Amino acid sequence: MDRERDDDAPHELPRFATVPVASLAVGFAAVLTALSGRYGYHRDELYFLAAGDHLAWGYVDQPPLTPLIARAATALFGDSTVGLRVAATIAFVAVVFVVALLARELGADRGVQVLAAGLAGLGGQPLAVGHMVSTATFDLLVWLVICWLVLRLLRTGNGRWWLPVGLCVGVGLLNKYLVALLVVALLAAVFAVGPRRVLRSPWLLAGAAVALAVAAPNLWWQAGHDWPQWTVAEGISSDDGTENRILFVPQQLIYLSPLFVPVWVAGWLRLWRDPALRWARATAVAYPLLCVLVLGLGGKGYYAMPLLIVLLVAGCEPVLAWTRRHGRTWPVVAVVLSAAINPMVTLPVLPQSALAVPMALNKEQGEQVGWPALADAVSEGWSEIPAREQARAVIFTQNYGEAGALDRYGSARGLPKPYSGHMSYADWGPPPDSDDGPVLLVRQEDARDIERYFTGCRQVAQVDNGHGVENEEQEAAIVLCSGTTQPWSGLWPSLRHYY
């Protein structure tokens, strides 16, 4: 296989900076662990916990991996935000190591490996997804591992590397279908600028077969349920597509740090121009191709983040060379400022009452605040139902965040399990038709349309998170209705919604 290797690719790689990178990873892990219990669960985490209690090969809006990880993390490390987020911290630590491996694959010495891992770890988006459990948390790791394996494939020309690439793609498909965009971008880039010989390898088909075999159970589930994932994706694109396209370029500039932009620009130029990295040029082409795909689909800006990190890694060596000639003042200032600002925007560092400014850049900060207060407001509304009618009463929520919060905090307040028509919660209902008593409806402040499915509705309580955080559930209404307009079984298809 050596004869297939690109003539410009290095035969030997520098030593891996095991101890410095491990020390860096331990430092990041300590910070994330120390902060993992502040604020509270994110709405998506509450949903993943609920999905983990209903394990399946698929859900209408996602494959099964993240709910499975959420269930495993709480079983192993404790049923709390701290226990759940151990999984995210482990994924973040793995990202730090993989980034260093990416740098090594590009010929970086130990110092550059540490710099690359440090800059990536300080990036805003990696910190944000490393703090909490989300599909993006594990997507980032899987995509970076794929990029590392593809670089090794391109450097060595050994087609057998298609097998681990296929395995990682299959795992990625079990987490989120977006990994298909990375595959398309990388294959198109290699076809465009080479080395094309790896595309002629029979191992490519073997790798594709491995990917499909790993992802097959979820694909079978989706096919058996009429591909609800596409309905969800179309809804997200129609709702947010225009906004996502407008914000895409600004987000590329800020997601790592505005001060890191010169580094990843230098990385792109290096990958494109450096004769010694001709074998890796496809990664420079893959990033703009991926951006075009995401823009065309109306996807979110962070979808392109892993390839942006690859560019950041490639840029560390020329930037370090620049500092040797011109001094370290400005690079040090950039790192210090990013280390001070990014955690405040992405991690639960500030008091909850001071989140207005960070939420302008990262609204997900606010989605970790106020869920126990929502359960308190629902408990207040539940007390309005006469005791003799509570056995036939139903709590119905507008979205999975509200339902997840009541699943988590409701039993301690004497509340029954909630129902919702949102996403996979719809598959876990409806209430039995015998529950024909009052309905306690939980809805966001401006979502009055949902009341048309119920009768005799009046507001009996309102959510106040107590910190003035203007998140989606602040001032949500708790509405007591006398009943439904028809039995639950007949009403349920109309209550189902995907966005």
Image (spheres, rainbow, N blue to C red):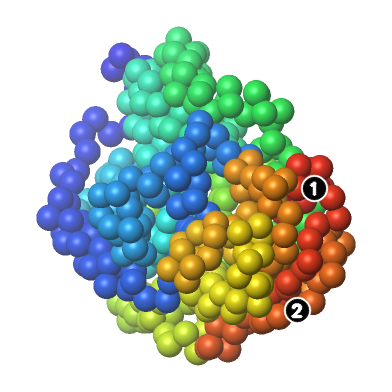
Who is closer to the viewer here, 171 or 264?
171
Q: Would you say the residues marked 1 and 2 are in contact, meaning their CB atoms lie under 8 Å apart? A: no
Q: Residue furthest top?
A: 202
Q: Is residue 110 above or below residue 427?
A: below
Quadrant occupied by the C terminus: bottom right
Q: What residue type is disc 2 on?
A: Gln
Q: Residues within 10 Å of mark 1 (few under 14, many from 20)?
A: some
**Location of mark 1 (residue):** 487
**Location of mark 2 (residue):** 459
Between discs 1 and 2, the one toward the N terminus: 2
Residue visible at 42% across and 36% down in the picture: 146
The answer to whether one can see residue 299 in this image is: no
Q: Residues within 10 Å of mark 2 (few under 14, many from 20)?
A: some
Image coordinates of residue 142 in percent, x first then y, are: 41, 41
Q: Residue furthest left?
A: 19
Residue visible at 20% across and 62% down in the picture: 26
Q: CA distance from mark 1 to mark 2?
A: 22 Å
Question: Based on the displayed image, in which of its 4 quarters is residue 203 positioned?
Answer: top left
**In this rendering, the label closer to the viewer, 1 or 2:** 1
Q: Assign a secondary structure to mark 2.
A: strand
Q: Assign a secondary structure to mark 1.
A: loop
